[in-house]
Amino acid sequence: MRDQILALLAETHAAGEVKLPSERALATRFSVSRSTVREALRGLADQGGIVANHGSAWVVQTGTKQLIQALGLQLQFGELTYDQLLESRLVIEPPVASLAAQRRSVEDLAELQRLYLFMSEAEADADFLRYDIAFHEQLARCTGNGYFVLAVTPLLVTLSETRQESLIENSRRTLVLDEHRAILDAIHARDPAAAGSAMLEHIGSFARSVGLTIPMDTAGPRRQSAGNRTARPRKAAAAQQHTKESDG
């Protein structure tokens, strides 16, 4: 029974849903009693897989919050380092950007453009960082593979304190926007190689700004250093013009 419900949880995640069928519906589906279903559900709840919603329905835990907490604890107790989180980003995000360039829809592109515009207009550092993370999450969604969202989000949120300090201390906003524009342009052009390269450069630029070590065997060859490029002015009007482009 428990294994059957676990399989259903996987289906629910894949479908983008969070609410499980009622106990009665589950009992009918699996041809068991409601008490058997209830016992299995409570066992899964004890393990953190699901949670009761107002006592009348069960919803699937997204897993992202738990992963963020786990990463934080592992950093606190020295089982992980920020360099290792950075290495994970280097392995995951450039291929994600490449896939996003291949698979994104017109709606996906419009959402990326919207988030970029919000970043360009954000005044508070916390708002800028929030839209920055949302931009990267949307790139993962553009792949059509929900696992990438689950993999990328905890890394970004866990590194967010370091990233915010970088924005405040080094006034990197204009450069970060320039790097995001390069990624966005590659996604718009459906250019996987350019998207992956732009993401790799963006992560490397962040690493250098906060003094993290870039694993050379992971990073591979880089184009001209982002620190040597001339950053484009941050203009909301330019972002708005980009949103009007048709999906040719």
Image (cartoon, helix red, strand yellow):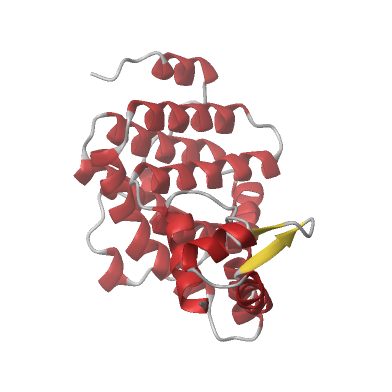
- Which quadrant is the C terminus positioned in? top left
Residue 120 higher or lower than 43, as above or below: above
Residue 190 higher or lower than 137, as above or below: above
In-front residue for pair 101/57:
57
Please provide percent x and percent y for residue 149.
45, 54
Residue at 46 percent of width and 46 percent of height: 136
Q: Is residue 149 visible?
A: yes
Residue at 60 percent of width and 81 percent of height: 74
Residue at 43 percent of width and 39 percent of height: 180
Residue at 34 percent of width and 26 percent of height: 106
Please provide percent x and percent y for residue 1.
51, 77
Q: Quadrant of residue 24?
A: bottom right
Residue 190 placement, left or right of 232: left
Please provide percent x and percent y for residue 22.
63, 57
In-front residue for pair 220/92:
92
Count of numbered marks? 0
